[in-house]
Amino acid sequence: MRRTITGLIMLALASLTPMKAAQAQAFDPRQPLAILISAFQMCGPPQAYSMLAPQLFNMVYQQTGGTGCYQDIAGAGPVSGMQMLGAQDFPIGPLYLIRVSHQNGAVADWFIGFNRMTGQVEFLRYQAPQQGSPPPSIPTGPAPTGSGPSPAPAPMPTPGTGGGSSSGEGCDLYPTMCA
């Protein structure tokens, strides 16, 4: 089991080398997200956290008291499926919206953004789908508050407060993807 996880991590890390535009289109963010979710559930392995940009790593460290574990993510159980709901390119790199299903029936929508120069995860946030609401989208952003801890590099502004900034469409919602 440990060998399989280590192998998956190494494969994901190799896939996170700096991306060119053509590579970004073929890139599948579900594999690194699955590895990070597993790490958040099992408190490691430590290599998984090397995917995170320094400010995101520090946020996860602070939010988890240095363990790297989120109890609500651990309680959801192993990932049973992932569905890509959207993608958008930003000045720093691509941002993806992925709906993740877990074996115990829990569902979460994850926003994950990658730096195309470093290959690291710059933005990461999850939320439970809102009952009776349409699925989220990258232009509307994640809910300003979510249930449980949310790995995120900075507090999120309220969605819908503007149509973007001079740095590009959506930079008001995802400032770390535009810096």
Image: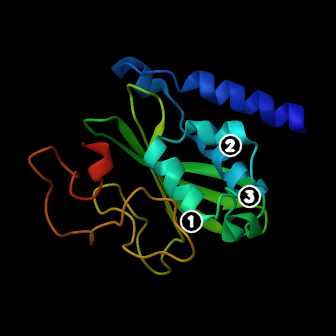
From the image, tell me which residue sits under label 2: 35
Marks 1 and 2 sit apart, C-alpha to C-alpha, by 19 Å
Q: Which mark is residue 63?
A: 1
Of badges 1 and 2, the one in the foreground is 1
Marks 3 and 1 sit apart, C-alpha to C-alpha, by 14 Å
Picture residue at 37% right of the left edge, 18% below the top: 20
Picture residue at 48% right of the left edge, 50% below the top: 56
Identify the amino acid type marked 1: Gln
Picture residue at 61% right of the left edge, 27% below the top: 13
Instruction: Looking at this view, name the residue that lies furthest to the right.
Output: 1
Instruction: Looking at this view, name the residue that lies furthest to the bottom.
Output: 132
Q: Is residue 9 above or below residue 157?
A: above
Picture residue at 33% right of the left edge, 66% below the top: 156
3 or 1: tag closer to the N-terminus: 3
Image x and y of residue 119, in percent: 47, 29
From the image, tell me which residue sits under label 3: 41
Q: Is residue 115 left or right of residue 147?
A: left
Secondary structure of the residue carrying numbered label 3:
helix
Identify the amino acid type marked 3: Gln
Secondary structure of the residue carrying numbered label 2:
helix
Q: Is residue 59 above or below residue 121?
A: below
1 or 2: tag closer to the N-terminus: 2
Instruction: Looking at this view, name the residue that lies furthest to the left.
Output: 166
Of badges 3 and 1, the one in the foreground is 1
Task: Inspect this view and state whether residue 85 appears.
Answer: no
Identify the amino acid type marked 2: Ile
In this view of the protein, which residue sits in the foreground, 154 or 128?
Answer: 154
Image x and y of residue 84, in percent: 51, 47
Image x and y of residue 173, in percent: 27, 59
Task: Inspect this view and state whether residue 52 appears.
Answer: yes
